Image: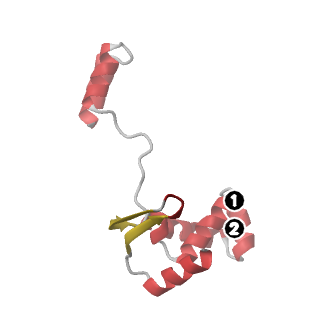
């Protein structure tokens, strides 16, 4: 499977790819449409390998230096280059107006806190 993915990313030469058919073998279902690849799958194979190594090293830049034979600044620059290609995923999105009003109604937050949150929406 990894070799197939490497071949596919090499074939694309970094151009964007779109998946038009997905088959779920165990269920015997095929879906056709227009599906974008997830952000990590859009990275070059080299960047994917670098990220996998980073995760497997538990984020240890020292270990990355040893594995790839590169310096600390080079590891950091490479990670920054990859991060720039990925969209920021908001882990704690701002509350909706109704959530803020519910929090205010249940006395979880003060009026001032509610106003501050509503201004941020």
Residue located 61% across and 70% down the image? 50
Q: Which residue is mark 1?
A: 60
Image-quadrant location for residue 116: top left
Q: Which residue is mark 2?
A: 64
Q: CA distance from mark 1 to mark 2?
A: 6 Å
Q: Position of residue 43 (x, y in %)?
A: 48, 72
Residue located 40% across and 59% down the image? 87
Quadrant (top left, top right, bottom left, bottom right) of the N terminus: bottom right
Tag 1 and tag 2, C-beta contact below 8 Å: yes
Q: Position of residue 70 (x, y in %)?
A: 68, 76
Q: Is residue 91 left or right of residue 117?
A: right
Q: Is residue 117 left or right of residue 72?
A: left
Please name whichever residue, 34 or 65, is drawn nearer the observer in this view of the structure. 34
- Residue 36 visible (yes or no): yes
Q: Position of residue 92 (x, y in %)?
A: 42, 39
Residue located 48% across and 68% down the image? 41
Q: Is residue 74 left or right of residue 34?
A: right
Q: Position of residue 67 (x, y in %)?
A: 73, 72
Please name whichever residue, 22 or 65, is drawn nearer the observer in this view of the structure. 22
Q: Secondary structure at mark 2?
A: helix
């Amino acid at each position: 499977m990894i070799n197939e993915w490497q071949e596919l990313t090499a074939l694309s030469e970094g151009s964007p790819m779109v998946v038009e058919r997905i088959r779920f073998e165990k269920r015997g279902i095929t879906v056709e449409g227009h599906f974008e690849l997830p952000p990590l799958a859009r990275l070059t194979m080299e960047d994917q390998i670098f990220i996998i190594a980073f995760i497997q090293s538990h984020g240890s830049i020292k270990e990355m230096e040893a594995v790839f034979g590169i310096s600390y600044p080079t590891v950091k620059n490479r990670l920054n280059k990859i991060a720039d290609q990925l969209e920021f995923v908001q882990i704690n999105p701002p509350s909706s107006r109704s959530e803020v009003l519910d929090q205010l109604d249940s006395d979880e937050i003060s009026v001032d806190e509610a106003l501050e949150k509503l201004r941020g929406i």
